[in-house]
């Protein structure tokens, strides 16, 4: 579907943090040369385990963190290094964030109505009756009704799922083009998760919203995402359409993830894996996954594998992609 | 495969005393685990699964009371044990792996001294040297380099800490181990690797497991039988082990499965269960699931369903066998 809305383009993004270790100043790079694009109405699922840099990347997009290198552009608007509050406010009218913990993201002494009214008044300048109407309409959009009754409730009177809906309504007040949803369902009960995912999916088509959906769960990444990007140790390991990644993954890490996911068709023995977290220090060499990879060779420890497109839209960063293994690709080449 | 019963829970009720009166966390639950069995227990937060685990271990905190029923482990009623006898029984006959290995280990002691302490407390005749040797052996068993014995918990990764906790649980070769969400806080790959190890240990040492989790797929995969808890009740449980640990029949269990996206299907429709789980102090009348059940009939609102057998499952539901079968969601 053609759209007049801009795309979100991230090019060669690097985020680095200083850390002090034994009196020595060092840097880690939780996001290490990452590029991708999200079109309006498109969902990119970002999959990775803890320490992969997926949340840092999400926070950099809404500019809660300033990147060190690379660029983030919305349409032709480069927002990588904007600093002024007016500019940042402008950015956040375009891109909003939904956080993981709906218990921590709402103020316990404010009613749901107050939470939303502040935003609508500030961003849309509505007052009085119009203001209330808009708030009720927002609550209705996220499936909370009757709005009049919901507005006077406090966060503690609502369940986790309802609170997450309020958090989503808050993000929608500014009519953003993009949402960064950082594990929006992982704190919720299993029976509630599906409806929140479905709500996000409906908003995508109703408002032509683009998402960066951050998760550690491949099944929901596939359900919601048009594309999946797999990160490890700050770098992109593999990216492609959701179906392609689940059916024809060639990166050893993605395959290990698939083998580890309960209910996966590729569920198989994982055996011993290194239990160490990836090295994030600046100046590391080689592939971040090398220390756990079953196919590791010398070149993996010294040279970073480039992200190479295999078939249309399916790119892999690996010196030894697992071709064959029930895949068609090997025969074609 | 029914051998000797290892755990027999009969009509167990556990209540919490709150300011607003008694809240029933576990409500008349009965089930049995036999030798060499892995029984999975699934439920959402607040359904009473962890409370029940603590009740079995006699670890209920202040304000929680067993108000009815009995628990026997290896034939011994655990609530008749007193003082030292309970302490001895606890780690030699039954052990527990808790959720969150971070908070279980003492941060100011090396992991070796924690294993050695456990051994010495329960094996009075054992010398310190023997205990150290045993600690090394246990580390090899859970495949951690024995050099790491001198580490403090914070020096180990989450996966290694959980392995240490498992090593301590099997240290005295109990016949029954409760695992309460043992892998929940870990990354999926480490999770899988630890599960594989738990199963290997079970094959080698031959103990039974009560495996508590909120992840239905996971429990289905590793268990011989599966039970499902909702609002303090055990609403469904497979009667005997078969190829599939549990073929879901209860409307709640089927709802849970429909709520989980699957990797296998291409174009699927997931469906949440409307409403949210009730709190322990405010349980609905009749069948506790009726306000959320799409198949609820008038009787469900007023009369509590009894336990019946439907297609090999013990099930608490007013619907008839035919009704339950006809709504069964695609069996996998």
Image (tube, coloured by chain):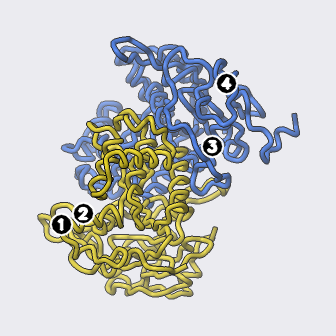
Chain colours: A blue, B yellow
Element type at marker 1? Answer: helix
Name the residue beneath numbered marker 3: A256
Q: CA distance from mark 3 to mark 4?
A: 17 Å
Q: Residues within 10 Å of mark 2 (few under 14, many from 20)?
A: few
Labels 3 and 4 within one chain: yes
Placement of A98 over or under B264, stated as above or below: above
Name the residue beneath numbered marker 2: B87
Placement of B309 over or under B279, stated as above or below: below
Q: Chain of mark 4?
A: A
Q: CA distance from mark 1 to mark 3?
A: 48 Å
Q: Residue at x 62, y 72 (%)?
A: B243
Mark identifier at residue A300? 4
Q: Name the front one of labels 4 and 1.
A: 1
Q: CA distance from mark 2 to mark 3?
A: 42 Å
Cβ–Cβ under 8 Å for marks 2 and 1: yes
Cβ–Cβ under 8 Å for marks 4 and 1: no
Name the residue beneath numbered marker 1: B83
Q: Position of residue A152 (x, y in %)?
A: 22, 52
Element type at marker 3? Answer: helix
Q: Position of residue B313 (x, y in %)?
A: 51, 81
Placement of B212 over or under B131, stated as above or below: below
Mark identifier at residue B184? none
* The image quarter in which residue A6 lies: top right
């Amino acid at each position: 579907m053609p759209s007049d809305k801009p795309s979100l383009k991230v090019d060669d993004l690097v985020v680095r943090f200083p850390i002090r270790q034994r009196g020595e100043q060092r840097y880690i790079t939780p996001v290490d040369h990452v590029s991708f694009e999200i079109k309006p109405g498109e969902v990119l699922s970002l999959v990775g385990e803890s320490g992969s840099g997926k949340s840092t990347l999400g926070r950099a997009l809404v500019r809660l963190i300033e990147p060190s290198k690379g660029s983030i552009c919305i349409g032709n608007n480069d927002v990588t290094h904007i600093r002024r509050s007016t500019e940042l406010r402008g950015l956040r009218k375009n891109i909003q964030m939904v956080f993981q913990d709906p218990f921590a993201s709402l103020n316990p002494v404010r009613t749901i109505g107050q939470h939303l009214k502040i935003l609508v008044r500030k961003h849309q300048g509505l007052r009085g009756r119009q203001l209330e109407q808009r708030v009720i309409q927002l609550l209705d959009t996220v499936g909370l009704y009757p709005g009049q009754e919901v507005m006077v409730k406090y966060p503690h009177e609502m369940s986790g799922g309802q609170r997450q809906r309020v958090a989503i309504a808050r993000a929608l007040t500014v009519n953003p083009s993009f949402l960064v949803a950082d594990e929006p369902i992982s704190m919720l009960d299993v029976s509630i998760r599906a409806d929140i995912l479905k709500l996000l999916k409906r908003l995508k088509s109703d408002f032509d919203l683009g998402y960066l959906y951050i998760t550690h769960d491949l099944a929901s990444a596939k359900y919601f995402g048009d594309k999946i990007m797999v990160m490890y140790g700050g770098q992109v390991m593999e990216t492609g359409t959701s179906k392609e990644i689940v059916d024809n993954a060639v990166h050893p890490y993605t395959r290990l993830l698939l083998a580890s996911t309960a209910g996966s068709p590729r569920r198989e023995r994982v055996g011993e894996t290194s239990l160490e977290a990836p090295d994030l220090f600046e100046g590391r060499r080689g592939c971040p996954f090398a220390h756990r990879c079953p196919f590791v060779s010398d070149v993996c420890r010294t040279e970073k594998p480039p992200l190479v497109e295999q078939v249309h839209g399916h790119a892999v960063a690996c010196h030894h992609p697992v071709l064959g293994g029930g895949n068609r690709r090997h025969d074609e080449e | 495969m029914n051998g000797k019963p290892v755990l027999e829970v009969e009509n167990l009720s556990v209540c919490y005393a709150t300011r607003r009166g008694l809240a029933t966390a576990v409500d008349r639950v009965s089930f049995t685990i036999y030798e060499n069995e892995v029984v999975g227990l699934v439920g959402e937060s607040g359904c009473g699964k962890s409370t029940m685990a603590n009740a079995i271990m006699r670890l209920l905190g202040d304000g929680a009371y067993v108000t009815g029923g009995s628990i026997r482990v290896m034939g011994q009623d655990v609530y008749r044990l007193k003082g030292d006898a309970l302490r001895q029984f606890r780690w030699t006959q039954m052990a527990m792996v808790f959720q969150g290995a971070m908070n279980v280990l003492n941060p100011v002691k090396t992991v070796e001294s924690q294993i050695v302490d456990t051994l010495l407390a329960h094996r009075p005749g054992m010398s310190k040297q023997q205990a150290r040797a045993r600690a090394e052996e246990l580390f090899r068993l859970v495949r951690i380099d024995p050099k790491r014995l001198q580490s403090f918990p914070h020096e180990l990764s989450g996966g290694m800490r959980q392995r240490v906790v498992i090593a301590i649980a099997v240290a005295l070769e109990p016949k029954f181990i409760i695992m309460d969400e043992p892998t929940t806080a870990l990354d999926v790959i480490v999770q899988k690797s630890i599960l594989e190890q738990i199963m290997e240990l079970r094959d080698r040492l031959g103990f039974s497991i009560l495996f508590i989790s909120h992840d239905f797929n996971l429990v289905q995969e590793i268990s011989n039988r599966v039970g499902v808890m909702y609002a303090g009740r055990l609403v469904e449980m497979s009667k005997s082990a078969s190829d599939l640990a549990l073929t879901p029949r209860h409307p709640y269990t089927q709802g849970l499965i429909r709520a989980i996206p699957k990797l296998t299907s291409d174009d699927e429709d997931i469906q949440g269960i409307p409403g949210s789980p009730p709190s322990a102090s405010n349980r609905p009348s009749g069948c506790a699931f009726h306000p959320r059940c799409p198949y609820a009939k008038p009787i469900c609102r007023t009369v509590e369903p009894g336990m019946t057998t439907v297609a090999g499952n013990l099930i608490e539901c007013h619907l008839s066998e035919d009704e339950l079968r006809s709504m069964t969601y695609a069996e996998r």
